[in-house]
Image: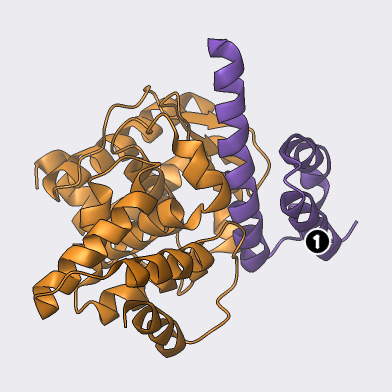
Chain colours: A orange, B purple
Amino acid sequence: MPEEGRRFWLDARYRRVVLEDVVAAVTYPGREDRLDEAVAVVDRAVEVGLAHLGIPRGPIDLPVRIEPRAVGRNAVKLEDCRLVLSATYLRLLPRLYSSPDVAFRTWLHESIHARQSYDPSWRAEFESWEGYEEGLADGLANILCDWAHALILETTDYVAYVQAYRALAAVLQMSRWALLRRLWSVPTGQVRATLLTVVDDQYHRLTGLRLPPEAMSRLRRTADALFVTGRTEVERSDHEVEEQWRGALE
Amino acid sequence: MTSEEYVRSVQELGRRRDYSSLIAFVERVGPDVEDQLTAEQVRILRVHLKHADMVLSEARSRVNTA
């Protein structure tokens, strides 16, 4: 990995210092003038690291914005290519979490949304089934944080959607990375359509057969139920979700 | 308002897909409860508010284009 990103990704102590610079700049009077520089250092490291790992970020409208949004509106990559983080969220990190690495994961998550311009019809997928896109971004961000040995809390933001992808990867005998990397290659708004193709291709690799139309229909219904908007809680075990996927593929 | 009541209100507005009211509500009331919020409550807020931000941004973009 190029030097610009290597230390941030691989040296947890250095990453903590850099992220704490951002938090300090939105917290303490007199530190505001350091905010732009601190944000630019983190963002450049994130960008360089993602490119090195083969999932480069697409164009965003730099600089990354830090705005006084309510907590919960933590971060968003908007259709117009702005990437916005909440100053309130950053300020609360020390109280809420044991590590500023949570901001690292959020930064990665939003940068994964920025892989390409959004598909023009993205809202048709996102409004009803946000989990296809949010589960992809959170699942990949978690894998990257594992690689960087980031100290992340056990739960992720989109727990139910991440579980759905984890269970599907297990059923398809794929790594989570292989499954999510395939889906990463299409823009926001095309993940739902692409998932069926990815599953069918892997099914063909495993069995030599293509999924019949009725199985594709069951797969669509199962996936839509698991990735439906508003699922904030894990309601079943991984094993039970794997059984759901298997039932769709039989 | 307690943080539990606040999160329930956000969830209800999210379920109703009343995104403009949702964002207005959190910007008005959020600062009064933010010091009481737990990490789990912030996680739930994040899911609902991210969705609202995304959908509203698309709606604004359509208006601007028109």
A182 or A200: nearer the eye?
A: A200
Q: Position of residue B52 (x, y in %)?
A: 64, 41
**Where is residue B24 drawn, in percent x and y?**
78, 35
Residue A59 appearing in the image: yes
Instruction: From this view, report whether residue A160 is shown above or below residue A250.
Output: above
Instruction: Answer left or right for A81 relative to B22.
Output: left
* Residue at the image position 32 percent from the left and 78 percent from the top: A249
Q: For label 1, count other residues whose C-alpha is less than 10 Å away and answer few (under 14), some (14-19) or many (20+).
A: some
Q: Residue at x 42, y 73 (%)?
A: A163
> Residue A214, located in which quarter of the rendered image?
bottom left
Q: Quadrant of the C terminus of chain B?
A: top right
Q: Who is closer to the viewer here, A96 or B2?
A: B2
Can residue A105 be seen in this snapshot? Answer: no
Kindly give the residue lying farthest to the front in the view shown: A213
- x and y, in percent, of residue A55 in the image: 19, 46
Q: Secondary structure at mark 1?
A: helix
Residue A4, position in %: x, y?
16, 39
As shown in the figure, which amino acid type bears the numbered disc 1?
Arg
The residue indicated by pointer 1 is: B8
